[in-house]
Image (cartoon, rainbow, N blue to C red):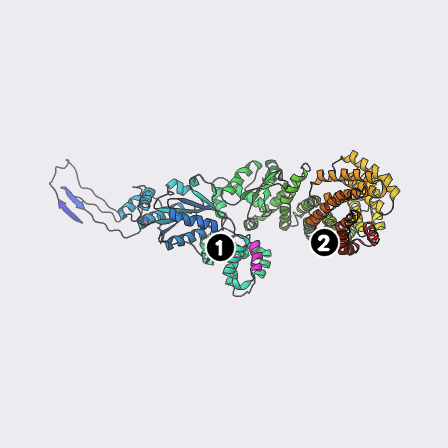
Amino acid sequence: MTAHNVPERDMAAGSSLQGRAAGHGRVYQAAGNQLITEHHHHYQIPARIPARSAAPVVPAPDSVRTALVERPPRVLRNRASVRAALASALEERGGIHVVHGMGGCGKTSLAHWLFQEARQRGLVGLWVTASERMALRAAMLAVAADRGAATVELVAAHNGQRAAADLVWHYLDHSPEPWLLVIDNADDPAPLEEGGWLRSSPAGTVLVTTRRANAPLWRGTVLHHLDVLPLDDAAQVLRDLAPETGTFEEAQVVARRLGCLPLALNLAGSYLARQLLESWTMSDYHEHLREDAINLIDQGADPAAAGRDSRHLVSRTWRITLDALAEQGVPETIALLRLLSCWGPDPLPLTVLSRSAVDDADLGAVEPSLRGDRVEPALRALLDHSLATLHRFPGERQETVVRCVQIHGVLLDSVHADIPAHDRTAYLHAASLLLEATLTDGHTHAVAADHIRLIAPHATALLHRVDRSTASGAVRLAVRVAQRIYEAGDYSAAVALASLAGDVSERLQGAEHPETLSARHQQGDSLRRQGGLQQAEALLQRVHGQRERALGADHPDTLQTAAVLSVPLYLLGRHEECLGWMRRAIAGQRRALGDDHAETLRSRALILEFLVDTGHTEEFLGDGPATVADCERALGPDHPVTVVAYSNYAYGLLHAGTPEDAEAAARRALEARIRLHGPDHPLVYSAELVLSWALMLCGVHDQAVALMREAVEGRERLLGRDHPLSVKARVLLAERLAAAGQGREARELIADNLADAERVYGPDDPDVKRIRATFAT
């Protein structure tokens, strides 16, 4: 310090020298005027200098020239299109690129790749983290220092004497070298917007990573959505990390279970790679995922990293967003996500979450509560923060568009495991009610088929979530869904869902619980349609015995199983047994339900086919017209039972009526099938088969063959080439071909298929006997 004398000036009368200092303060006093010059030399990073305000001091990062990535992948898999776009941006400069996606999808890894790419191209790489306001400010001031800002300017900015963002961008704009600025983890855009930190510059490129899909601040930027990896690339990530633990195919199985989420893949691969006491293969790891998936996945994290940042754990990474949303006044996002976690990761129709249905499901008692009028803002928040995605699915016949929401499976598992035990029952119960509320009978076939295809995976997922207290509703729902799948013609899926429902109900409620038996009944009927005739007959026999013991012989459920049991018996050639079961069912249903009940009429419609094939022609001619008329009167012409009556009556007329009458009835049956089921359904092809036979008897051979070929192709496509109905269809096609004079193809079909038909249906099956006799001559 130096002091210089200056000319003395008069001082005010009565003035006195009174100076005080505290701490490191200094006071300079003089009776005359003095000019004092102080020299200060600062060697600290400016962000460490205390501001004059009471705000806490946040240290600047140790470096802005290093990508702050805990464990970047050795090889960045896939992302080819976005990598190409970002690499081009390095050359063009001046743009702001925002990479958004759910937590754990690899945004920071992609940013790290671009950071290294920029450095290899000679650009200056600058990396800041935007997860916290003060840390962002300190890091951006460090960027200004890196680009040449003077100490005095940084101190002024730090102390609020100069606009900090203006200072930073002045030096970025005038940087002598081109640069890439990465602003990582900008999940809350508010600090960037409030501080004016996000700008573009002709001197470099800005890359922002965020979970926020929609934010006003992103307007004018280039958006890149990052999703999970394709399956093959996801499997390769596991092979990159733990190549000795499994084949590529085994890695695909694990990757699929992990939903191809990069964070989960890296944790799983790291766990497998650094095992000491265990020697798990990828197949072993997949099996253990069934026990406690989220906890097992998290064990792949570096303990030190996991302790510092919950982004490194799949169990906690999404909690960052949920906590922020709760602070922003949308706590219902937690309740909505917990509800969604009761279902599966497949697309869920938005109609499931209608306001009235959510209110009826009564989630007001959980904390935070969820009301119907709060679902919309909660869902929008999930979408905006990349916790959910919205999809539009065209209907099967392009007549409808179904809007769906989809949540990643690992996120659902993580959230579900975090539901408080005292709230779990309420959520599972609500999930069953909401799905069941959408199973209305008012849809057209196309809409109903599209809807049930989307609902079925969630009924399946719900069965895997329930416990003893919530099993009843979920099993009841699953049986109803399996029935709808069965009606839509997807018999394999119906078998799978009904079987799972039966297994879950048996484990939690007992083998002879009414809901267990309902599931087994549906399983048996679906098995029959699938072609498993022996398995269906054995299962239905067992269900009937259990229902008879538990409910009584004349209970409607017992009688329903008796009626359904008659069908595989008929197809197996046990015709007298079939008639005995069906007649017992009809008599009991008339007593218990009445003549006009749908189940009574269904049984009466089914027996028409059996009567003519077993030689009871007079009984068929007496009952057939009356059954059709009763169904039309009581149920209407387009009811499924009425359509069965049309179809079986037409089939019977092929044996017991004139060809012209049979053709007219068969056409009516086919038209009714198409109205009810749509044009591409197994039962439509069965109706075509009947009409083809009627045309053959009428001598219209070309049309008969063309229609029969269509029926064969349809059955093989929907049911499989080896399905019993497909085998019989090929045999019947041979009969039509022979009648049309195409003997060579007919003989080839018979040579390839008649033995299979005899094996499946038995040598006494009417169709098999007739066709064998035809070709013998």
Name the residue at the top extreme: 633
Which is more toward the observer, 179 or 17?
Answer: 179
Q: Residue 722 carries which label?
A: 2
In the picture, the disc for residue 77 is 1
Circle 2/circle 1 CB separation < 8 Å: no
Q: Is residue 491 visible?
A: no
Residues at marks 2 and 1, CA–CA distance in whole angstroms: 41 Å
Q: Residues within 10 Å of mark 2 (few under 14, many from 20)?
A: few
Specify which label sits upstream in the sequence, 2 or 1.
1
Residue at 81% x, 35% y: name it: 629
Nearer to me, 726 or 489: 726
SS for callout 1: loop
Q: Which amino acid does label 1 sit on?
A: Arg
Secondary element at image label 2: loop
Query: Which-is-in-front pick, marks 2 and 1?
Result: 2
Q: Which residue lies furthest to the left in this view?
A: 7
Residue 522, horizontal then vertical, whole percent: 73, 48
Crowding at dot 1, Cα within 10 Å, few <14 / some 14-19 / many 20+, comes out as: some
Q: Residue 428, position in %: x, y?
A: 62, 45
Which secondary structure is most common in the magenta stretch?
helix
Please tell me in which quadrant of the rendered image residue 432 appears: top right
Q: Which amino acid does label 2 sit on?
A: Asp
Q: Is residue 153 at least partly visible in the picture?
A: yes
Question: In the image, which residues are magenta?
Answer: 248-268
Q: Please provide percent x and percent y for residue 116.
A: 40, 54
Task: Specify whether residue 491 is painted magenta.
Answer: no
Give left or right: position of 312 versus 45.
right
